[in-house]
Amino acid sequence: MPTKTTPPSDDLTNPYGYSEMDWAAQLDPAYAAARAEVRRLSVGEDGALPVKVKEFVVLGVLASRGLQYGVEAHMRRALAHGATKDELFEAIKAAAVPGGGVAYSVGVRALQALEQDGAFAPAPPAAPARRPRSTARSAGRSM
């Protein structure tokens, strides 16, 4: 049960970039509104779980069904809600237990596609390694 309630959105566009769903909404706006409400209740901001966690669940299900396009879309939404590359990879590894090899391979391909698209901030450069001080040199200075 949601912990808070918000009025249903008048926005029928989907948050995942599925252009076919936007197209279908033009054919039947009432159905699109009903789907938008179900989406809001299931993966919206209300409820006990953060959106990124809900997206991990969704992408695991989609990966186990072999739907890379959907996995990528839900990974992007999870990123928008604070997920990290490591968390996404861990979600895929967890999905591989019940979902098998297809879940793992589809998830890895989706993660790789996001990386190739620049979805992840580059890692900060590593600090240069500090050279340990030589005890002989240190001893020579103290004399």
Image (cartoon, rainbow, N blue to C red):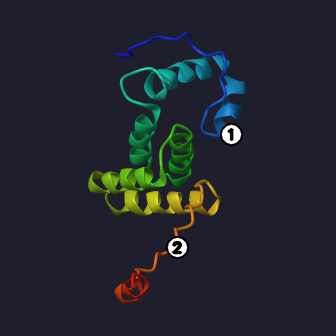
Task: Looking at the picture, tell me which residue is in the foreground, 16 or 114.
Answer: 114
Q: Is residue 3 left or right of residue 27?
A: left
Label 1 Cα neighbours within 10 Å, binned few <14 / some 14-19 / many ≥20: few
Q: Is residue 25 above or below residue 52?
A: above
| Residue at image point 55% right, 18% down | 34
Mark 2 / mark 1, whichever is N-terminal: 1
Q: Would you identify the image quadrant in which residue 42 lies?
A: top left
In x, y percent, where is residue 65? 42, 50
Q: Residue furthest front?
A: 143
| Residue at image point 43% right, 55% down | 86
Instruction: State yes or no: discs 2 and 1 in contact (Cβ < 8 Å).
Output: no
Label 2 Cα neighbours within 10 Å, binned few <14 / some 14-19 / many ≥20: few
- Which quadrant, please, contains the C terminus? bottom left
Task: Looking at the picture, tell me which residue is in the foreground, 126 or 107.
Answer: 126
Amino acid type of the residue that numbered disc 1 sits on in the rendered structure: Ser
Provide the secondary structure element on which disc 1 rests: helix
Question: Of tags 2 and 1, which is closer to the observer?
Answer: 2
| Residue at image point 37% right, 50% down | 91
Q: Is residue 122 above or below residue 22?
A: below
Amino acid type of the residue that numbered disc 2 sits on in the rendered structure: Pro
In the picture of the structure, the residue carrying the numbered disc 1 is: 19
In x, y percent, where is residue 63? 43, 52
In the picture of the structure, the residue carrying the numbered disc 2 is: 128
Q: Is residue 104 left or right of residue 122?
A: left
What is the spatial separation of the Cα atoms under label 2 and label 1, in whole angstroms?
47 Å
| Residue at image point 31% right, 52% down | 94
Task: Looking at the picture, tell me which residue is in the foreground, 104 or 84.
Answer: 84
User: How many numbered marks are there?
Assistant: 2
In x, y percent, where is residue 137? 42, 88
In x, y percent, where is residue 49? 37, 29
Provide the secondary structure element on which disc 2 rests: loop
